[in-house]
Amino acid sequence: MPPFIKRHWPILAAILSGVLCGLAFPLWNVPALAWLWQWPLLAALWLVPPVTRRRAFGLGFLMSYAFFLTSLWWLHELGRTAGSLWAGLAAWTLLPLYLALYGGFWAVVVATVGRWRPVEAVSPGDRRHWLSGLFTASLPGLFAAGLNAATWTGLEWLRGVAFSGFGWNSLGVSQYRSPVLIQIADFTGVAGVSFLLLFVGQIGFLTVVRLIREMRDRRLMRPHLDFTLAMALVMITVLYGIARLTPRPDEKTVPVRTLIVQLATPIDLPVTRETLEKIYEDYHDLTSAFCGLGSGVDLVVWPESALPGQFYQRGLQERIDLTLAQGDFHLLTGGDIHEMGTGEDYNCLILMHRRAIEGQIHRKRHLVPFGEYIPLRESFPLFVWVTGSLVPSDFSAGTSIEPLRMEDSPVSLIPLICFEDTMGELARDFVRPEPQIIVNGTNGAWFWESANMEQHLANAIFRTVELRRPMVRAANTGVSCFIDQRGRLIDQGGIDRIEDPDTGSTFTRGTLTQTLDVPLAGEITFYAAHGELFAKLCGLSALLVLAGGWLRRKAAR
């Protein structure tokens, strides 16, 4: 082995773990790596003499930084949008520096209280201890894997709420293409899938290590209770998934014929009277082609910020009225609203039926830092410099958690704007015991033709499972599609999203129609009722174990 690798292999192992974890997510989509990515890091933390807390933090930080650099590389596209290479590089490198802190803290736990300590071998001749030792050899592994998985899950929850929250790409999201594994989300949220991957992955690593040691030392192989329990946990998850994926023939549904319109308006399109008129005309023409009288279309969805200008402009509302006059349907569109009384600006979804002026307005609740407002705008000018001219003024946040309601229909809409569909606890606030559709309007044009779009979809899929409600996703650029209440994209004739028929690219204009069968009962899932309870209990349990260990060490001094 080269001296450099021999000396620095723990650092290389940590970086490798982070890269492998990143490859489990879109654009690379190798979900099997989500079960194995931690093995190199575990080797660096467990198979060497105990490392210091500082070194463990450093290895965990490197692992996590490599993961976020790999999975969030699309952040550099902000430089293209802002017209500043430095803005893109700053976004891509600085945000992961903060996010990597969570991985550093996790590694400290793995290397100390959560460190695996193998049980000493017991001679088969010593029957008094040998029989009990058959199973106790597995207990250290179960404790370590359980504590470390719970700690990781609790830290993922904390990352999703601290400092405005960035819960994007929790480990469980990597399994978005495996419907049978993600059905447990209606109880645990995506946190349950993250826990499963962490727990089973560590038990798998320990099983391989123990088998190698038993064969090397020619010891009698012991039962691997930890591996058996891990496989049982996977089997229970799979069986539950199969049960939830099985259609219920007695389930009553409400059909809602829905049309998505995607215009793919470039972020750098010059703002002129001619371009604005063209946008209005294109949305009108694409909608009118499907929504004539008698077409049967109930709902039309345009994406976030679909129409330039302020919604209260008289000319804009007159244009919308012309579109609404084409048929008897509801139109949900994104738009900006400036309220004259308060002087505040809002990013909104507006649901209209016959006249635009009578539309129901939902104001976005969770704003994107550096996208819709600049934190510390007045007191920290560096933030203003980094974002350039992207955010000339700040939006205000809405507070309503009331669904939008369709006239003459029992169906209500859960309105989520932009990355709000990646936040389970925010989405569940709108749940009512009635037929509902989750509707997300988003505009990913800021990130051009990058993996951001597919990753956004991957995160959003879990909302449909957690709440057991279908989703309509209308994106300006990216993945516009329909998702059923089991987290599966609804396929119609081999097409499950708006895409170019020749290239398969989703960065194109087009339309997609589907009749959604919305469950009439409006099931209230455990997650809808209790939110991230599983993640919080994991975090609390880990915290209690860590506190108990600290008190024991203090008492022993």
Image (cartoon, rainbow, N blue to C red):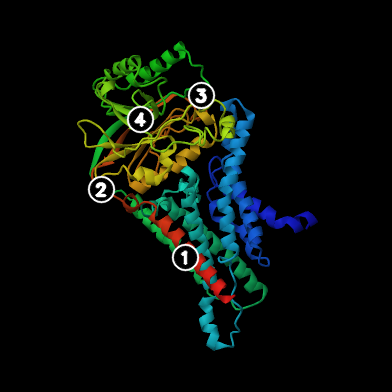
Residue 77, can we see it?
Answer: no
Please indicate whether residue 134 sits to the left or right of residue 530 in the image: right
At label 1, the amino acid type is Leu
Image position, residue 395 (x, y; %) = 43, 30
Q: Nearer the viewer, mark 2 or mark 3?
A: 3
Q: Is mark 1 on a helix, strand or loop?
A: helix
Residue type (three-letter) at the residue carrying disc 3: Ile
Residue type at the position of mark 2 = Pro
Q: Mark 4 points at which residue?
A: 349
- In space, the residues marked 3 and 4 are separated at their CA atoms by 19 Å
Q: How far apart are marks 3 and 1 (CA)?
A: 49 Å
**Numbered circle sitting on residue 544:** 1
Work out whether mark 2 precedes mark 1 in sequence or the reverse, and give the earlier one.
2
Which circle, 4 or 1, is nearer the viewer? 1
Q: What residue type is labelled 4?
A: Leu
For numbered disc 3, what is the local secondary structure? loop
373 and 433: which is toward the camera: 373
Instruction: Give the labeled residue for mark 2.
Output: 249
Q: In this view, does 64 lie to the left or right of 349?
A: right
Dot label at residue 267:
3
